[in-house]
Amino acid sequence: MSDNQEPHYTENVQEHLLQVQHLLEKHALVEAVAHQQEIPRAERHELIDQLLHKRHLAELREMLSSLHPADIAYILEALPIEQRLLVWDQVKADRDGEILIEVSDAVRESLIATMSRDELREAAEQLDTDEIADLAPDLPQAVMRDVFKSLPIEEREQLRAAISYPEDTVGALMDFDMVTIREDVTLEVVSRYLRRFDDLPDHTDQLFVVDRDDIFKGVLPLNLLLVNEPEAGVETLMVSETIVLHPDDKAEQAAQAFERYDLVSAPVVDEDGKLIGRVTVNTVVDYIRSESESDVLNLAGLREEEDIFASVWKSAKNRWMWLALNLCTAFFASRVIGSFESTIEKFVALATLMPIVAGIAGNSANQTTTIIIRSLALGQITSTNTRRLIGKELAIGGLNGLVWGGVAGLFAYFLYKSVLIGLILTGAMLLNLLLGALAAMLIPFAMQRLGRDPAIGSSVMLTAITDSGGFFIFLGLATLFLSR
Amino acid sequence: MSDNQEPHYTENVQEHLLQVQHLLEKHALVEAVAHQQEIPRAERHELIDQLLHKRHLAELREMLSSLHPADIAYILEALPIEQRLLVWDQVKADRDGEILIEVSDAVRESLIATMSRDELREAAEQLDTDEIADLAPDLPQAVMRDVFKSLPIEEREQLRAAISYPEDTVGALMDFDMVTIREDVTLEVVSRYLRRFDDLPDHTDQLFVVDRDDIFKGVLPLNLLLVNEPEAGVETLMVSETIVLHPDDKAEQAAQAFERYDLVSAPVVDEDGKLIGRVTVNTVVDYIRSESESDVLNLAGLREEEDIFASVWKSAKNRWMWLALNLCTAFFASRVIGSFESTIEKFVALATLMPIVAGIAGNSANQTTTIIIRSLALGQITSTNTRRLIGKELAIGGLNGLVWGGVAGLFAYFLYKSVLIGLILTGAMLLNLLLGALAAMLIPFAMQRLGRDPAIGSSVMLTAITDSGGFFIFLGLATLFLSR
């Protein structure tokens, strides 16, 4: 970010949100009053403008201009669409770019939809090339063409490269704001060189040492620059054994490296060893947060982050895939039950007990799969320990089956005074928990082998298996033992 | 961390894990061979030692000594308990402390259990006070007393303070490694002062300006120190409008500030304005990761992170609370069905269809609650937009009820050739989806008002409501309309 003005930090951004909402309410009230009095449209507007309207908006503008772009983004996200656009209009045009970068995808879409081609071009031009690349998917083609033309050759190349990297790679996290130095100089020379800058790029915790051909040689942490004597040479102090990322590396791997090694920045180098960019910890933090959010959203069957004030229609579409899928598995489970209708007719108790078999196994399987998916993501499951893990999870499934199946069996016995029904329930729960544990491991393993993310979709399949499987096992056992 | 040796970064820690596993397997093989030949125990050990055993362990030791503590932690977590302890024994004692800090809670427990009081004391003494505080809950009281005695007065105070802060506060994230300067000096003086250090603390991106009484005045970013002329004064360059944390602030709030403002470090100040510590981005990253992990774990009903190689018994206990709770709600749902036994006896189709009503509403409600919980966590839901949100979610519930209820109704009609059953199913799904949507909002709102984390436990309650509610509505409607 190239902000020259001092950033304004606030300790409690929620207070600002409340202030904005308060101003907007007053503003709306004035509009409403003018409305009620049925003043002709033209006059009404004049009146409002003259009276209070303008004052509230001016107050709003002033407040916004003192806020950090990230805080404005936060406020925009928390406002319903028409209020959001009103606030967006009050933001100074020269801050549009920074704010568009900060808002969530869904909200960004709603803001961009209201901006003209020129406004968008101006907003994009305020940004660094890596940031333009982040906006690119949301910008109209024509705007991107304009922006492209306005850039100097070198930055065009950067932008082209930045856009080309797939979303989950280091290339997509990379920026180009790095300070490079040569190894054959002294710290004194480096210090003099740095004093020629107006400001160093954010998150400059180390300088990158390269040769004439931009080949990466190592890093000089600012720490070392500061604690050593000016006469010392870069060559003797620079650290050449350091983490080096490649643009095609997976973003998750880079994030894990930042976490493990407590990095603030890391160089990105191409296949020829040329330094082409760097990744900084703030990008990594955003990546980790957005990944963890999409994990939680995916678990609940939401395709993407939702603008909480999106239209009902838009939100519903975000949720339909999952519900449709679940309906299909529910239909299947329903047909499994249907095939035992005659048994249920004779022993209606079965209908009351069958949800227990399906539910507990589903929950237990979900616990297992959560642990397996996490371990897979960390790469902690290797061929040597897989069998052991499977054994352990089956043992837990068995233990849970005996304990909770036993409890449920007793419950059924006391209700229906039938030892047989109790035993059938216990047996069915034991078997279904074992089935669930097995599926909870095999599904993520299979998904990973197929190159898919095990976190997405495992749970639908799992529930389908423990539901249909549970009904089949329970009603099947009942048909076998009760019906004769 | 006070490592003087250069940290060793590896780009692919999984390779090292595989190497370790390979060495351990060879090691185990040798033991097994010796076992089979039934050589007396004493001789056997000698033999193994002389032959291969020692060689493998030596190889292992060498490899471990070249690894970063975080990587060793990773490997320890991925090994079953007996292999883990074998590897732990090969780690040089002077690295124990750093590694204990890095491993997960569950694994740390397993390692500490094997260490003597002296070993633990030595390990703890290698650490900074804020790190000792992190270990404290896992260390025996006697060890903590020893460690305490070994510290200089100032650090004792720090440790006492660090231990006293609750887990989710800024105080618990804070460290004491900061460089402070006075405002009435020039950059030249600051530079000379810094050159007296052997090394600056990790993540020193800014120096903290304090007065004689340690009252916090502002920060001097290293950036500014480097780009300005040595004659400039700290006073004119220092930034006084900056984020300032307090030890009692919520950790989540600090994490959000780091994310929003892209911070690397931030000062922590007590109620008198005295600088008492700092928070750095690496701690924040760890916090964010562990929070997001516990979110996912809690959603699946796991109390805490599990050591994947913990005993069956230990793992089962981690999962029982949830299963027990679910069993109770399942019993309740079962009794709801039970009260309609006579209707089911007459229309057994109801038994096959009822899981559909419960399932879809459960999924849809889960989607709603996920979005609500996320918005609550971000503080985006305020009194002015609550009603609007409720309206929107009810509308989505209604829309989904009509669409998916309609589809399910058609399914039932084609199966059972009864318009009435189809209509009852559609109506029940519509009502249950509305009920689910309402509960999905009110439960997290209520939990938050009660000061509890809405992410924990909301889903059990929700499922209980959509299950029992769904059965009640569907079977109730059927009894009303079919039975006459």
Image: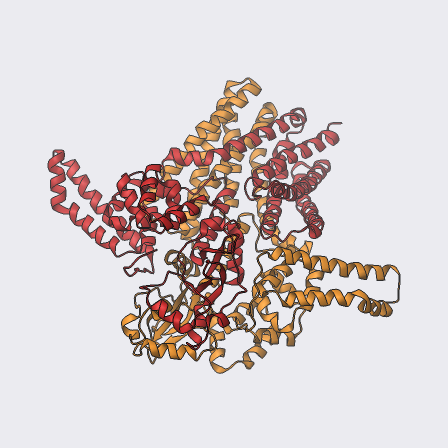
Chain colours: A red, B orange
Left or right placement of residue A59 versus residue A461 in this view:
left
The residue located at (48%, 28%) in the rendering is: B405
Residue B81 place in picture, x, y as percent: 69, 60
Where residue A342 sits: x, y (%)? 67, 24
**Residue farthest top in this picture:** B417
Q: State whether residue A78 appears in this view.
A: no
Between B142 and A318, the one lying in front of the other is: A318
Count of numbered badges drawn on the protein: 0
Q: Which residue is drawn at 30% across and 60% down?
A: A8
Report whether B82 appears left or right of A146. right
Vertical comparison of A374 with A236: above or below: above
Q: In this view, does B11 lie above or below B392?
A: below
Is B39 placed above or below B438 here? below
Between residue A226 and residue A41, name the one nearer to us: A226
| Residue situated in front as seen by the camera: A90 or B352 | A90
Instruction: For residue B69, say whether it is visible.
Output: yes
Q: Residue furthest front?
A: A212
Return the residue nearer the eye: B192 or B261. B192
Rendered view: B484 above or below A325: above
Q: Position of residue A462 (x, y in %)?
A: 60, 39
Give x and y (percent) for residue A343.
68, 26
